[in-house]
Amino acid sequence: MKPRWARLLAALPAVTLTAGLATPPAAAHTSLPHLHKPLGLPRPALPTAPLRQEPLGAPLLRPSAERAHPPWAATTSRGWNDFSCKPSPAHPRPVVLVHGTFGNAVNNWLGLAPYLVRRGYCVFSLTYGQLPGLPLVGGLGPIHASARQLAAYVHRVLAATGARRVDIVGHSQGGMMPRVYLKYYGGRHRVHTLVGLAPDNRGTDAHGLTKLLDAAPVVKRRLYELAPGLIEQETGSPLLRHLNAGGDTLPGVRYTVIATRYDEVITPHRSQFLHGPHVHNVEVQELCPLDLAMHAMLGLSDPVAWHETANALDPAHATLTTCASVVD
């Protein structure tokens, strides 16, 4: 391991802004776009005008055989990422799964993806935000760059399936980052429903640990240079202030936020909730007081969160979510 990554990993307990926690399988290395430029401290102000929307069909990276057919694009043994899948009349929109920090297209969704496939959905997932030297995990690169990668992936899914819109289900950073895509990169016209599982919509204070970084600006600057996607998830970061300015939601998109009061990563947990039209916020303990799910479990194994996700994707056929909801 290169020395700079050893220093980063040693410092991660002080910036616990993480989501996907399983050991991931191998994935192709992906270079990031030009947005990976250290900001340094003090924090600069983000632009007040909306960023220019780039053509969704434009390639983000130089073409190569490896990037055109990365490992996670292949059909998995459990039936998702099948680009020959055609949405049914019952489920006309494909579902795009967006992993959390340190996750990838597979490890974050080993349970939920097959759960949705069994219900008749065309399900897809991508790996975004990879950095040189860390090919196995994503969600560490600049969040605007990750949103552009999501835009390109959604474009590909729509082209393959013939659908007009997708639904997105994201965990942790994967529940917040798509809002950057919606706001700046044309996503509001291509996304019908956004479901956030423990999303850091207003960042996290990591139980106050991020204040330690504010007291050590040199360390914070170095961490930003190594993994900007981590620092951009801190409560009050320029990216989040700009994202949430002017309201949490956009017209034409339906939002569901599913949170747990036992979240140990995105704190305080109620900061995950959105406010505005067509928003449904739910705490899993309101549906099942016995649910002890923590942060990672909402994406990996919690039947209450999964059942509520299915309800959000198909509200016309929603059924009551209780402690008796099971993963079948």
Image (cartoon, rainbow, N blue to C red):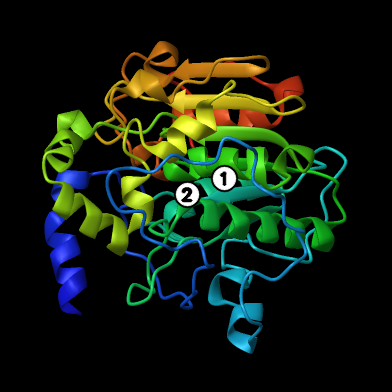
Amino acid at the residue labelled 2: Gly
- The mark found on residue 111 in the picture is 2
Q: Position of residue 202 (x, y in %)?
A: 41, 29
Q: Describe the element under mark 1 as helix, strand or loop.
A: helix
Q: Quick one: which residue is furthest to the bottom in this view?
A: 65
The residue at which mark 1 appears reads as 115
Q: Position of residue 193 (x, y in %)?
A: 68, 33
Name which residue lies at 37% across and 18% down.
270
Position of residue 40 in the picture relative to residue 167 (left or right):
left
Q: Is residue 54 above or below residue 181?
A: below
Position of residue 258 in the picture relative to residue 149 (left or right):
left
Name which residue lies at 43% across and 53% down.
108
Q: Quadrant of residue 77?
A: bottom right
Q: Describe the element under mark 2 as helix, strand or loop.
A: loop
Q: Nearer the viewer, residue 283 or 223?
A: 223
Q: Position of residue 140 (x, y in %)?
A: 38, 58
- C-beta proximity under 8 Å, tags 2 and 1: yes
Q: Quadrant of residue 293?
A: top left
Q: Quadrant of residue 272?
A: top left
Q: What is the quadrant of the N terminus in the image?
A: bottom left
Label 1 CA crowd tier, 10 Å (few <14, some 14–19, many 20+) = many
Amino acid at the residue labelled 1: Tyr
